[in-house]
Image (tube, helix red, strand yellow):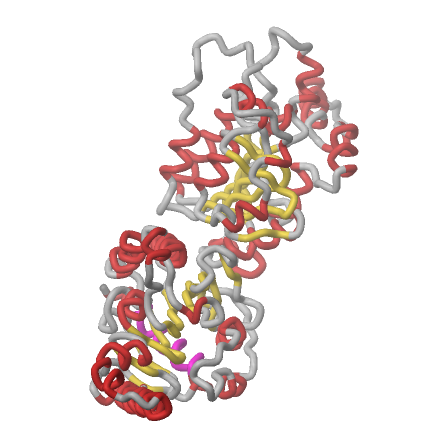
Amino acid sequence: MSKVRPELIELYNRLEKTLDNNRSQAQIKRHAKGNRTARENLSDLIDENSFIEFGQLAVAAQRNRRDYEELQNATAADGVLTGLCTINEADLGPSNAHAIAIINDYSVLAGTQGFFHHKKLDRMLELAGKYLLPVIMYTEGGGGRPGDTDVTTQIAGLNVTSFASWARLKGKVPRISVNNGYCFAGNAALFGSADFCIATKNSWIGMAGPAMIEGGGLGIFEPSEIGPSESQERNGVIDFVANDEEHATQIAQKLLSYFQGKAKKWTTLDQQDLLKSIPENRRMGYPVRKIIETIADEDSFIELRKVYGRSIITGFIRLEGNPVALIANDCQQMGGAIDALAAEKTSDFLTICNAHNIPILSLIDTPGFMVGPESEAQGAVRKMSSLFGYGANLNVPIMAIVLRKAYGLGAMAMVGGSFIEPVYIASWPTGEFGAMGLEGAVKLGFKKELETEIDEVKKESLYNELVAKMYQAGKATEAASHLEIDAVIDPSHTREIIVKVLNSSMIIGEKR
């Protein structure tokens, strides 16, 4: 047996110091709180044996104030694991699975961002931009680190480039942030700048931590009082709230997969179930998510920002393995009326999908935009109008199916600003169309006739008669006969037709 050179032994000893087995106290502390170590999250996220680690030997820039041997263990990798990897290779193939993983290590100086920590971030973000690699970043940590005393060539560190480099990737590569635990200041800025933000229930996320808040004279707060996940979910900060780190990792993998291409395998549900999904009573709500789950490949639907802007559902599905972005009105929330928050959420979502060339399916059942003083107080004019601005500038195909109500500007906004914008727009037989909701149109258009009738019973009868006439005039078959939509379809054929349109539009797109 040949002699092992001492340099190689030294290297392996040094690398071992960065691993969980040699940082047992840190590992025990993480597990005691129900959390995983950074390397455990990394191992779960990536494909086995696919990680090429960058900067593993880094330590905190504190050699002039701490023992170097201690730094090698206590500040392993300077608090962040970075490298190239593959994710989802088994489902999407080796050529589509390349990615970058960045995992903050809270066991190193509370996950704070030091000098070499930032250099490692910058190295990976440069590679992401140059080679168009998607990035998944775990962001747990307390923000900037003031204790890196080795750094003598800067004063405030405001020339750090990590934040600009991360933001500059917007629209170029998918960026997914994942958080568990405390995430403050610089860590929160990275978390919130991602295209999609996943956080566990046990997350607290804020642009300032307790020390900064107290230093600003704003009071003393516990970390758990700042930006709890339930609050940030309502605010629209978090796209998906996961149960724990394992669940968050699964969601990150699934979310990334829509940007990696077509899945090799899929199964479907019974499409006949769609025939009974719309109630006979046109005023009654129904669970549109069941419709989405039936049309989509089985178990492929993922919803984002579920409790923010609730009247529009945004998320991703697959159709015969192909990734598709989905927007849908939820008639169980304000009757499907589009409020300012829902419009804002949808505009953001469409922008990301357009940048990454993901086609869009719109399922429509809306009486239009939410109206009234309270709606205007939310900035309705600007936020609702943004749907037209973003929708009309889509480069990806948009397909639309009217499930029931399609009224006014709100319905137009759901398809890019006009019913002529989609590559294909069809309706189920239950569809109804008009410049505004039937009831409102009757009350406005026939106000004089209704006021003339004194007898309340006769007035109600006249009102119902007028509504029925307008319904007949605006039902789906009439809209199709006037070529305001392309077709009226059997609900059970919806998936089959959308797949055909999707395949056609993809071919058209390739020829353009």
For this view, does 106 lie left or right of residue 439?
A: right
Q: In the displayed structure, would residue 210 be above or below residue 282? A: above
For this view, does 467 lie left or right of residue 100?
A: left
Query: Going 37% across and 91% down the picture, which residue do you hit?
Result: 457
Q: In the displayed structure, would residue 510 be above or below residue 485? A: above
Occupied quadrant, residue 168: top left
Q: Is residue 52 visible?
A: no
Foreground pick, 206 / 393:
206
For this view, does 38 lie left or right of residue 464?
A: right
Question: Can you name the residue that lies furthest to the front here?
Answer: 454
Total numbered circles: 0
For this view, does 259 lie left or right of residue 111?
A: left
Q: Which residues are magenta?
A: 494-508
Query: Going 47% across and 54% down the picture, which residue do you hit?
Result: 95
Occupied quadrant, residue 261: bottom left
Query: Going 23% across and 83% down the picture, which residue do you hit?
Result: 446
Q: In the displayed structure, would residue 336 be above or below residue 165? A: below
Report the predominant secondary structure element of the magenta stretch.
helix
Whether residue 289 is in magenta: the answer is: no
Foreground pick, 482 / 215:
215
Quarter of the figure with the C terminus:
bottom left
x and y, in percent, of residue 364 in the image: 38, 73
x and y, in percent, of residue 87 in the image: 56, 51
Whether residue 496 is in magenta: the answer is: yes
x and y, in percent, of residue 27 in the image: 75, 33
Foreground pick, 401 / 412:
412
x and y, in percent, of residue 129 in the image: 39, 39
Quarter of the figure with the N terminus:
top right
Query: Going 63% across and 7% down the picture, which residue do you hit?
Result: 65
